[in-house]
Image: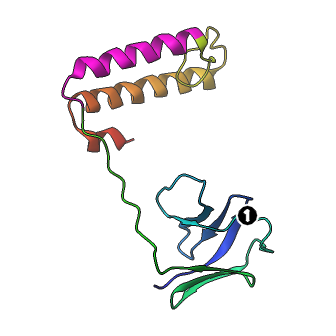
Amino acid sequence: MKFHGTVHSIFDRMVNLKCPNGELYTIAIDSVDNAPNTLITDIDSFSKQGLAIGDQVYAEGERLYVGKNAAVMLQQVHVWRSKLPSYPEDEEILRNHVAAAQLWIEAHGKAGGMKRSAETANPLDQEMERLLRERSAGLLEALSKGEVSLAFIS
């Protein structure tokens, strides 16, 4: 395995690594959910490892070295693969769930973002509301046609 980067940020439950190309990777403790570009370890806390932002990170043999004080063994590393759920066979169930979510948001949601504000006094709020409406309508249309690839086009 080849890897070279630096420590980008340090938290108690994870440390983020930055590659020269700007891509971020994460090393996390085992109670954190797995995700893309994340290595789950049995380390109990990263804030106690003596790491500093900018520390060098590199892979050598079966180990990933993080700074001067931490190393992660890579013998049993498995690549994370996401599996998207299939589109529902009964679209009516999906529509009912969306309608229920919309009712909940209207009753309990905070105005701004996707929930319209009763007061759209300034031009920025008005433009953001217009763009959100436009993009969400495009997303709904793409998903209703089963064209998932179009759902991510901005």
Q: Position of residue 147 (x, y in %)?
A: 23, 38
Left or right: residue 143 compared with residue 62: left
Three-letter amino acid code at disc 1? Ser
Question: Along the line of sight, which residue is nearer the eye, 64 or 5?
Answer: 64
Q: Residue 44's image quarter? A: bottom right
Main secondary structure type of the part rendered in magenta: helix
**Is residue 120 magenta-colored?**
no
Q: In which quarter of the image is the N terminus?
A: bottom left
Left or right: residue 130 compared with residue 108: left
Q: Residue 78's image quarter? A: bottom left
**Is residue 102 magenta-colored?**
yes
Left or right: residue 13 compared with residue 23: right
Q: Position of residue 85 (x, y in %)?
A: 30, 41
**Residue designated by label 1:** 45
Mark 1: few/some/many CA within 10 Å (<14, 14-19, 20+): some
Q: Is residue 16 above or below residue 62?
A: above
Q: Residue at horizontal 80%, vertical 68%?
A: 48
Please give the range of residues in magenta.
Answer: 88-107
Q: Residue at horizontal 27%, vertical 40%?
A: 148
Question: Along the line of sight, which residue is nearer the eye, 23 or 69?
Answer: 69
Q: Residue at horizontal 51%, vertical 87%?
A: 62
Q: Is residue 106 above or below residue 142?
A: above
Q: Position of residue 15 (x, y in %)?
A: 67, 65
Q: In this view, does 48 lie above or below 106?
A: below
